[in-house]
Image (cartoon, grey):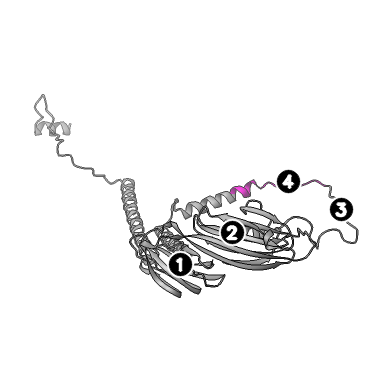
Amino acid sequence: MTHGAGGISHGGGGGFSGGGGFSSGMYFTSHYHGRRRRSDNSGDDAACCCTICYLVLFLLCLMDMKPRTRIILTWLYCILGAGLTGGLIGRHHSSLDLSASPTDMRKVDKVSPTFCQSVLIDSSSLITTYRFKSEPKINQTSSMKYETSVTTTLKSEKYEYWGFYLLEGSVAAATVCPDNGMSLYIFKGKENLDAWIENSLCSDCYERNYYLLYCSGPQYARKFTISASHSDQYYFLFANEGYSIIGPGPTTANIRFEIDRKVYDFDDSSIVCLDDFDCDVPIPLQGPASVVFYVPRDRSLDTSITIYCRPRVYIYVLLFAILPLTCGIIVTLLILRLSRKSIQERTRSESQIFAVSNGDQLHGYANESCQINVSPPSYTDAPPSYEDAVANGLK
């Protein structure tokens, strides 16, 4: 079983700290009367806004800039995007720490066939590991029973808990006989237990809460039951919150746990490791695969298990090296082509303007379909002779 203990925390609150308050019974109040000078910060705000807008437009490449600058930004975004995305995905699938109890049968979460070529299970106790070809199904006609007894002594404002991973349909019961007043909390999920440990005044983090009275013998013990509505980790937490019945002091309780567990149907599974501390389970890239480990009943009450994802290297190289490199090259070539086209158009426009300013004749396009016939002028009278023209010139 998963086991832990600690001191009760009632959360943070307001109030005065040890260094606050008044000193030597004296205090001073100072008042300032005067005209408050108004400061007009509209100019500074406008300048700040313009700077932010300029920066945003620059980073989004929505303003005029040199092609070299666009290319630098493109490769910067490719490198940062690939590095951040690959790092987050690798961290998400890197490792997972679990605590298991005897007869726990648990499916390993976060197994990605895309990013994990195998799953390494490192256990502090000997466990058995199975691999299913598909999602494992719960066997509704079979179950496994487990019983154990513990004794705990809780000082004032202390707690102790025991947890079990229960498949849907399982039933766990705790029979308790304390020699003084104590509290019992039932939790579903590790996050709810952590919320109570951080602040025991939370009202919605536990499933049920009971106040137990003095028990004079086993025949007066009370039994509390958990029916697992979903496959999850469930906890019994006992706390000495000062509700004394026979007087202040520690509380000792004898507790007996009885579990009727549902188990998986193993018809679609194969044993990868039998009673081993470390097990490396290969994960096929195509098709779903599920990994389940089982802790035998004779193992320790608190088995720590760490699950590692061995990365599928070529997938990381493809997605976070080759793909960003290809995108960067394509965008770079596109920027160079557009910039070259823009330069050519600008050069042509400047040459035309220069030609017009120097009086040069601009040539247009020839239109073959358009024909113009030029005929010499006609005279109604005969043109003058050469002698008449010379004589008229002498006059």
Please name whichever residue, 144 or 379, is drawn nearer the observer in this view of the structure: 144
Q: Position of residue 283 (x, y in %)?
A: 37, 66
Q: Are marks 1 and 2 in contact (CB under 8 Å)?
A: no
Instruction: Mark 1 vs mark 2: give the one in front.
Output: 2
Locate the C terminus by quadrant: top left
Check contact, mark 4 vs mark 1: CB within 8 A.
no
Residue placed most toward the observer, 382 or 340: 340
The local secondary structure at tag 2 comes to: strand
x, y percent for residue 338: 34, 53
The type of residue carrying mark 1 is Phe
The circle drawn on residue 38 is 4
Name the amino acid type tagged 4: Arg
Relative to 62, residue 126 above or below = below
Q: Residues within 10 Å of mark 3 (few under 14, many from 20)?
A: few
Under circle 3, the secondary element is loop
Q: Mark 2 = which residue? A: 173
Front of the two marks 2 and 4: 2
Whether residues under marks 2 and 3 lie with C-beta atoms below 8 angstroms apart, the answer is no
Q: Earlier in the sequence, mark 2 or mark 4?
A: 4
User: Which residue sits furthest right?
Assistant: 25
Q: Which residue is found at the position 36% from the left and 61% from the top?
A: 268
Left or right of residue 252: residue 98: left
- Disc with the residue nearer the chain's start (1 vs 2): 2
